[in-house]
Image: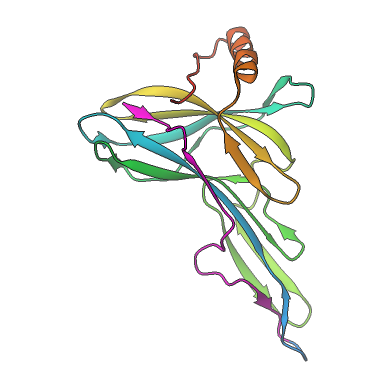
Amino acid sequence: MLEIPTKAFEVSEQPFDGTRAAVTVLGPRSAPLFAPAYWRATLALRNTGRTAAVGLRVVITDVYRVTDSGEIATVDFSQRTLPGDGELPSRLVARFLLVSRARIANHDSGFVFGPLSHAMAGNIVGMQVTFTPARPDLTEIGNYLLRVITAASNVRAKTHVVEIDLQPDGLIKISFPNVTILNALRRLDRARHQPSVSHGV
C-alpha cells in the first residue's frame, strides 16, 4: 500500500541546482543587482507494503480554489504526472516535487506543479529570464486543494487531497485539509460523481 505520511511535506527556499544567490549584470560597476528567490515544496510517499512498488506514479488530477467564504470552486487544469522514481522499495519513502516558484528581478515564474528551470542572459541593458515551463499552473495567491492519485503497477490506486496555501511573499504552505473542507469537497464530488477521497494517513 502507498500512503502519504502525516509529516509528508517539506518546503525549501534554497536556490535551484546550479544557481547562485545573487546575479551580476555586466556594466561599469559589476555588482549584484538582486537576490533571486526560489520556493519548492515536496510531497513524501511511503510504501507500507512488503514488496517494492513498481511503476510508481503520482498524478495531480484536479485542482480546486478555496474561496474566502469557504466555498470550493474548480480550476481549469489538465492532469499532471509528477516526475520521480519508478520503483519504491518496501518501507521506504520517496519525495516528489509538488510545487515550484522562482522570482528573479522583475521576472516571476508563478506557481508550477513539478520541477521548474530557468535560463538567464544579462548585459548592460538588462536581464532576460526564461522559465521552463513558460506558463505557470497557478498565478493567483490563496488556498487550493489538489486531488492527488498515487498508484503503481502492483499497487491499487489511492486518492488523496492536499491543501496548499500560496502566499504573497512567495511562501508555500502545505497541509492536509480539515474536516470542514473535506466534507465540502465530498459534497462537490457527489455532484460531479468523483471518487471518494482519503485523508492520506
Residue 118 belongs to magenta span: no
Q: Position of residue 53 (x, y in %)?
A: 27, 34
Which of 88 and 79 lies nearest the eye of the viewer?
88
Q: Kindly identify the residue that appears in the image at 61 percent across and 13 percent down.
A: 183
- Chosen colour scheme: rainbow
Considering every residue shown, the one lying at the far bottom of the view is 28
Foreground of the two, 192 or 42: 42
Q: Quadrant of the N terminus?
A: top left
The correct choice, above or below, for 200 with respect to 39 in the image is above
Q: Does residue 25 show up magenta in the picture?
A: yes
With 81 as the anchor, is 132 left or right in this view?
right
Quarter of the image with the C terminus in it: top left
Question: Residue 147 is drawn in which quadrant?
Answer: top right
Q: Residue at x 37, y 43 (%)?
A: 94
Q: Position of residue 29 (x, y in %)?
A: 76, 89
Residue at 64% over, 20% down = 181
Q: Where is residue 131, by image quadrant? A: bottom right
**Above or below, 160 relative to 46:** above
Residue 110 point in image, percent of width and height: 68, 49
Extreme residue toward the front, this view? 7
**Range shown magenta:** 1-26
Per the picture, the main secondary structure of the magenta-coloured stretch is loop
On the image, the x and y values in percent for residue 189 come to 59, 13
Q: How many marks?
A: 0
Residue 77, placed above or below residue 22: above
What residue sits 25% from the left and 40% below the top?
89
Depth check: 53 or 27 in front?
Answer: 53
